[in-house]
Amino acid sequence: MSTRLRDLMMGELGALRYEPTEKRIRGTLGGTTVVDSTSALLVWEPKRVVPTYAVPAADVAAELIPSGERIDEPAGIPAMGAPQLGDRPVLDPSIPFAVHTTTGEPLTARAGGAEAAAFRPSDPALDGYVLLEFEAFDAWYEEDEPNVAHPRDPFHRIDIVHSSRHVLVELDGATLAESTRPCLLFEPPLPVRCYLPREDVRTDLLAPSETRTACAYKGQASYLSTATDDDVAWYYPEPLREAAEVTGRIAFFNERADVVIDGERRERPVTPWSRR
């Protein structure tokens, strides 16, 4: 019997997963380089959808201090409510590093007067490694290139293609955009995103938002909102080179607006960007 590959990968979402990387990984904390490793791993705790850097403790030039009791019974999905991907609750980067779904010992990495959370998992394959809180560090580098948002997943990619499909975006009966020259950005398991030329968007119905986010694959995003809605669209003023094709183009949340492609109204998907 054949197996859909996405189902196979999602079927392991509840497991502790890891993958070695041949990249040299460096991290700065308190103004100094405290991580420099060519033996790093990418680790996904159960239900985490993006990886965390794990490096040998010997490659961490910081004091590693136990910061609490051992976690022998992981709490799993936090009481605050987790985002969902389809019908599955997941832990995306909005869920703090301190929420652990595997057993281990919470630590604090301290150097140069700065601190970052760390975690020593109690798993034989990860013995001697510590997971490090990405956001608490000043900067991270893969080889000599800075990395943003979170470690890159070697099994995750974006694919951008030019299209002549007819794309219509509506919200509460109002047309926000209409175009026959979208760039379609494929990033499974997320829904396809339609990046539209600014000239094909009713920017007079949108206002700049103060929201800013970062994507490890596309860069720093700015947002647009409507008068009666929260952030409904975004764009990348200066995307990373892998996403250069969408520079300045505007995409709308399929989760928050109605997207019609070639006359077919798409269902609003359930993703971490759906309203909770």
Image: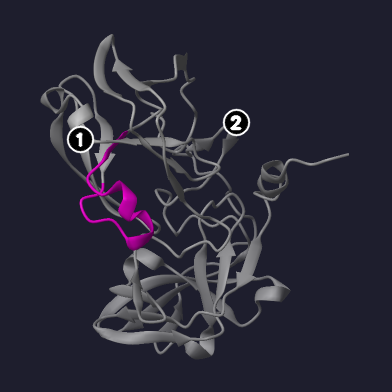
Q: Answer whether residue 244 is magenta in the image.
A: yes
**Which mark's residue is nearer the viewer, 2 or 1?**
1
Identify the secondary structure beneath mark 2. loop
Name the residue nearer the viewer: 70 or 38.
38
**Which residues lie in the magenta part?**
236-251
240 horizontally vs 103: left or right: left
Q: Which amino acid does label 1 sit on?
A: Arg
Three-letter code, disc 2: Asp
Task: Indicate whether 118 appears above or below 168.
Answer: below
Which quadrant would residue 70 be assigned to in this image? bottom right
Residue 69 is one of the magenta-drawn residues = no
Which is more N-terminal, label 1 or label 2?
A: 2
Question: Residue beneath label 2, please?
Answer: 87
The image quarter containing residue 142 is bottom left
Q: Which mark is residue 198?
A: 1
205 lies above or below 38 = above
User: Mark 1 packing: few (<14 Cα in 10 Å), some, or many (20+)?
Assistant: some
Does residue 185 sit above or below 178 in this rendering? below
Numbered circles on residues, count: 2
The answer to the question of whether label 2 and label 1 lie on touching residues, with beta carbons closer than 8 A, is no
Q: On the rendered image, what quadrant is the C terminus found in?
A: top left
Residue 143 in view in this figure: yes
Q: Where is residue 199 in the image (x, y as percent from the top left)?
A: 18, 31
Residue at position x 60%, y 31% in the image: 87
Split into 4 quadrants, where in the image is the N terminus?
Answer: top right
Q: Can residue 218 be seen in this view?
A: no
Give SS at disc 1: helix
Q: Could you tell me residue 222's position as x and y percent?
A: 21, 45
Q: Nearer the viewer, residue 28 or 223?
A: 223
Q: Distance between the residues labelled 2 and 1?
A: 34 Å
